Image (tube, rainbow, N blue to C red):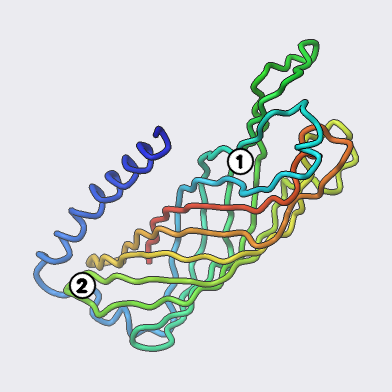
Amino acid sequence: MQYLLCNKIKCLIVVAFLSPLIAFSQLTEGINLPDHDENLFHFGISLGVNRAYYHFSNNPLFIQKDSILSVESLQNSGISLAWLVNLRLGDHFDLSTYPLNLIFTEKAFQYRLKYPEPFSGEGTLVTRKIQGITLALPMQIKFSSDRINNFKVYILGGGKVEYDFAANKGDKNAEKLMKLDKLDYGIEAGIGFHFYFPVFVLSPELKLGWGLKNVHSRDPNLKYSNVIDEIKSRTINLSFIIE
């Protein structure tokens, strides 16, 4: 229930932000930047916030042992900063990429333990956070509607490759809680809006990402890793692009 309430609040915030922009774009007299869409290349800067978590499956060892009663992946917030390069393919199609795209995330697993170790400070409920500093290279096809005054809507989809500098697969420290691969790949889809102002274009964009690779390097010697099998990333990103 709390998760659904948070999602409703986020939707209301997005609607509250977009409504005045849409009204402005429809009521403003004259067409701003009339030749903007005719340019072969567009460049911009993107600043975004994200919610990230892991989709995972349990290893058979989870059923065989009862030291860990349950495992849950928690959502956490992060930020992203990117440089946009957009290639015009036609009146309604564009090819977009972000040659420089840094994403800062924080994902977490929550464990419910049957036999906590009080001498190490463990309780029955343990949360283990995983920091991520990722360099991503997405490639997206964008389909845009016709321009209505100073407003346009678009949808996009494509693939991405990511490299996480904070991942620790090669770390030999036995105290590490989870070993993850640095390289990941996946697909993305989303929706966005172009608002044409006199000297720039503002584009709020909501995008969902699905990681396709199992990034978990399972270690049977690690307490919090051996009960999990596959781990795949999931992200929800809201960004604001200025061209």
> What residue is drawn where x is 30% and y is 49%?
14
- Front residue (pair 163, 202): 163
* Left-right relation of 46 to 23: right
SS label for mark 1: strand
The x, y position of residue 125, in whole percent, is: 64, 22
| Crowd band around label 1 with a 10 angstrom C-alpha radius: few (<14), some (14–19), many (20+) | many
SS label for mark 2: loop
> What residue is drawn where x is 49% and y is 48%?
50
> What residue is drawn where x is 66% and y is 26%?
112
Of the residues under marks 2 and 1, which one precedes in the sequence? Answer: 2
> What residue is drawn where x is 14% and y is 59%?
23
Name the residue type under label 2. Asn
Query: Does the residue at mark 2 contact the one at mark 1 (Cβ under 8 Å)?
Result: no
Q: Quadrant of the C terminus?
A: bottom left
| Crowd band around label 2 with a 10 angstrom C-alpha radius: few (<14), some (14–19), many (20+) | some
User: Where does label 1 land, which residue?
Assistant: 107
Please tell me the numbered disc located at residue 215. none
* Left-right relation of 130 to 102: right
The x, y position of residue 220, in whole percent, is: 87, 40
Q: In which quarter of the image is the N terminus?
A: top left
The x, y position of residue 104, in whole percent, is: 58, 46
Q: Quadrant of residue 73?
A: top right
User: Where does label 2 land, which residue?
Assistant: 32
